[in-house]
Structures are given as structure tokens and as C-alpha cells.
Amino acid sequence: MTYLVTDSCIRCKLMDCVEVCPVDCFYEGENMLVIHPDECIDCGVCEPECPVEAIVPDTEDDSDGKWLTINKDFSEKWPNITVKGTPPADSADFEQETGKYEKYFSEKPGSGS
């Protein structure tokens, strides 16, 4: 099992999860984070840290593996992030929105840290 970052993170990117990860398996895109599934040790400490509940076990990925693929693919392209950064100024505007992947997902990498 691994944990995955899902749609709820897009445009929120709050990063509370990053500093509790003991293996630094988060990677930063322009407007969301992903978890490298091969690096995640399934400890689960990140899940309760996410205020928008964007982190779920892969067993709860009800998208036919879409989020597992996104996390795997982009964790190999985006920079690793180990320190909590500043979330987007308008992140609160997107916390309750659903269906964000189709509207806002960006393949561009974040700055990393």
C-alpha cells in the first residue's frame, strides 16, 4: 500500500504533510503535491495533516488507478520538497471545490525545496 495525493490538493497545496514525512517522498508541482509511491513507507502520518483530506491510501483510490498513475508519473518529473512552503494566496477559495483536475491541474514543476 501507498498513500496518494488527490484532486483536493490542486490549487490548495497547503503542504502541512511535507514536514511530517519521515522519508521525504513528496514532490512539488506548480499547483499541487504528489507522493512517490515507491518511496512511501505507508506510515500514514501525512494523511491526518492534510486539512482538505487530499491524501488517501491507494486502497481508497476510487478512480480506477488515475491518482496512482498521476502520483507516480509526476513524482518522477517534479522536484522533491522537504520543507513546508507558502501555499497559494488564494488557496482557501479552492478548498471546497471538486473536479479540480480537469479545470486546473498543471504539469509544470514547482520550485522544490
Image (spheres, grey):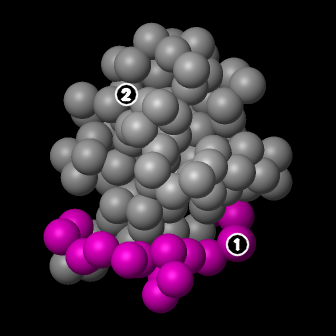
Is residue 8 or residue 78 the one in the foreground?
8
Q: CA distance from mark 1 to mark 2?
A: 23 Å
Q: Is residue 86 visible?
A: no
Q: Residue at position x 67%, y 35% from top? A: 36
Q: Position of residue 90 (x, y in %)?
A: 26, 78
Q: Amino acid at mark 1?
A: Lys
Is residue 93 or residue 38 the one in the foreground?
38
Is residue 59 or residue 88 the one in the foreground?
59
Picture layout, residue 32 above or below residue 55: below
Is residue 37 or residue 80 the one in the foreground?
37
Q: Position of residue 62 (x, y in %)?
A: 45, 50
Q: Identify residue for label 2.
A: 46
Picture layout, residue 2 above or below residue 104: above
Residue 102 left/right relative to 94: right
Which secondary structure class fits the magenta region best? Answer: loop
Q: Identify residue for label 1.
A: 108
Q: Quadrant of the C terminus?
A: top right
Front position among marks 1 and 2: 2
Q: Amino acid at mark 2?
A: Cys
Q: Position of residue 4 (x, y in %)?
A: 51, 40
Residue 73 left/right relative to 46: right
101 inside magenta stretch = yes
Q: Residue at position x 37%, y 28% from top? A: 46
Residue at disc 1, secondary structure:
loop
CB contact under 8 Å: marks 1 and 2 = no
35 inside magenta stretch = no
